[in-house]
Image (tube, rainbow, N blue to C red):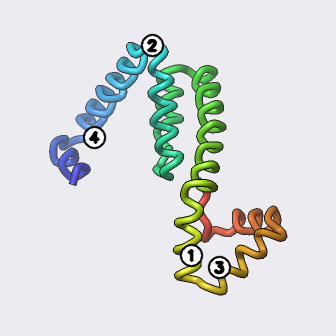
Amino acid sequence: GTAAYFALQYKSISEWAEFAEENVNNLKQVLLDAGYWGPIIIFGLYFITTVFMLPLWGFHMTCGYVYGTFWSALLISVTQAVCAGAAFLTSRYIAKPFIQKRLQHYFGKKYDAISKAVGKQGFKIIVLLRLSPIIPFG
């Protein structure tokens, strides 16, 4: 829908580049004009995308472009740490009962076996699951 609309609006690569440059510069100006609210806006958006597992690919580039290497690295590092903690707490205390109930319903004894194994050897099981390409990271 939206991508097709934009694709039809600009016919050449130079028009696409001009469109992208204009919008990136507008975003940069908005964040810089926001003053100290700019990093707070980025933090808030990053927080929402982390907790709801939405794509994060644009935040790092945007911060680097707007604030430079040092300040963006500092902002992203702090933001990632806080948001990872928030995602953990959300999954642990808010989403766990709902997810546990659904997994129990769909997988029954298999889920019970995995849950029991994680309870006894949690670190080992989580490392093995993280190494598996089937379980996504992020």
Left or right: where 58 falls relative to 127: left
Of labels 1 and 4, earlier in sequence is 4
Percent across and percent down for residue 131 are 72, 65
- Label number found at residue 35: 2
Q: Nearer the viewer, mark 2 or mark 1?
A: 1
Disc with the residue nearer the chain's start (3 vs 2): 2
Label 2 vs 4, first from the N-terminus: 4
Q: Nearer the viewer, mark 3 or mark 4?
A: 3
Left or right placement of residue 33 versus residue 18 in this view: right
What residue appears at the point 53 percent right and 46 percent down from the top-left corner? 50
Q: Position of residue 52 (x, y in %)?
A: 48, 51
What is the crowding at mark 1: few (fewer than 14 residues within 10 Å), some, or many (at least 20)? few
In this figure, which residue is indicated by the disc labeled 1? 103
What whole-number distance in Å separates the C-alpha atoms at marks 2 and 4? 34 Å
For label 4, the SS is helix
Kind of residue at badge 3: Tyr
Q: Amino acid at mark 4?
A: Ile
Looking at the picture, tell me which residue is in the foreground, 134 or 10.
134
- Residue type, numbered disc 2: Gly
Q: Are marks 2 and 1 in contact (CB under 8 Å)?
A: no
**Res 9 → quadrant:** top left
Q: Is residue 55 above or below residue 136?
A: above
Q: CA distance from mark 1 to mark 4?
A: 47 Å
Residue 15 tag number: none
Q: Amino acid at mark 1?
A: Leu
Asked whether the residues under the numbered discs 3 and 1 touch, taking CB atoms below 8 Å apart as contact, a structural biologist would say: yes
Rendered position, 70 above or below 51: above
Residue at coordinates 56% horizontally, 55% vertically from top-left? 94
Marks 3 and 1, the one that precedes in the sequence: 1
Placement of 56 over or under 72, stated as above or below: below
